[in-house]
Amino acid sequence: TNNVCNQLHLPAQSGSNTVLERMRRGYTREAYLTLVDDVKRIIGNEDDDDDDYVAFSSDFITGFCHETEEEHEDTIKLMQEVKYDQAYMFAYSMREKTNAHRTMVDDVPADVKQRRLQEVISVFRTNVQERNEMLEVGRLRLVLVEGEARRKKKNDSGVVVGRMWSGRTDQNKRVVFPSLLLNDDNDDDDDDDFGWCFTEEEVKP
């Protein structure tokens, strides 16, 4: 339908079945990937010729109780397989009044949690950069304009020369583009990419 964006948030938390079981998530890695495949088949796949592909976002936690290097690698492999367009990634922190707090020990050292988190972030950034270059750069997108962006268009001397606007694509990707009202010519040619945010070289009505 034209009034529903092609973006879906599917929290994974981990790519390891044993971690998912300890987290009491109620699903397996295999069931999760089956759901991803079903969504792509029904809504759209980036391998199709048209632009109506579905974008996935997710949540990931590194260093959950008793997490091993092998379990951490399962999460890395899941991220590489699904190739998320957005992700919220955190190191595990024990919370009171949870099953983990009552029955487990937060035994993964803080430095290991942070190292694994940085690895997860690095894989996500690499994947999203590749996807953006493949699926977004050079494409004309319909954008829902949300308002004026905080970023301003500047010349080579750093002087503000025009307003910028911000909006969202059908895949919920943020786009920053020059003001049409001022008829700005954006002569940036570096396709600035901030993971979830694009600077458009040209926006057409």
Image (cartoon, grey):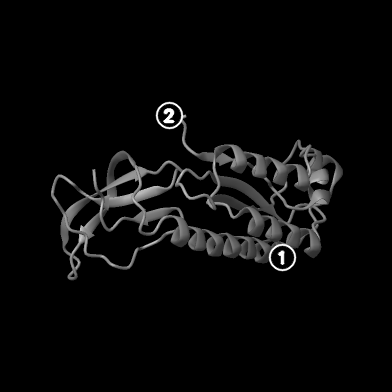
State yes or no: discs 1 and 2 in contact (Cβ < 8 Å).
no
Q: Earlier in the sequence, mark 1 or mark 2?
A: 2
Q: Secondary structure at mark 2?
A: loop
* Residue appearing at x 78%, y 64% in the figure: 69
| Residue 123 falls left or right of residue 151 | right
Secondary-structure class at tag 1: helix
Q: The disc labelled 2 sits on which kind of residue?
A: Asn
Please tell me which residue lies in front, 64 or 149: 149
Which mark identifies residue 164?
none
Inspect the image, locate mark 1, and give the three-letter code of the amino acid beneath it: Val
Q: Residues within 10 Å of mark 2 (few under 14, many from 20)?
A: few
Find residue 24 and report its image quarter: top right
Q: Which residue is mark 2?
A: 3
Give whichever of 185, 195 is nearer the camera.
Answer: 185
Image: 23 above or below 115: above
Tell which residue pokes out farthest to the front in this image: 49
Q: Position of residue 87 (x, y in %)?
A: 56, 50
Alpha-carbon neighbours of circle 1 within 10 Å: few (<14), some, or many (≥20)?
A: some
Q: Residue at x 43, y 47 (%)?
A: 173
Give me the disc on residue 112: 1
Residue drawn at (76%, 42%), measured in percent from left and top?
31
Q: CA distance from mark 1 to mark 2?
A: 44 Å
Q: Position of residue 116 (x, y in %)?
A: 68, 63
Q: Position of residue 162 (x, y in %)?
A: 17, 54
Is residue 106 shown above or below 96?
A: below
Most distant residue in the bottom direction: 157
In this rendered view, identify the residue nearer to me: 46 or 162: 46
Using residue 170 as the reference point, say whether residue 32 is left or right of it. Answer: right
Looking at the image, which is closer to me, 162 or 170?
Answer: 170
Task: Point out residue 98 in the picture as x, y percentages from the top left corner.
Answer: 76, 37
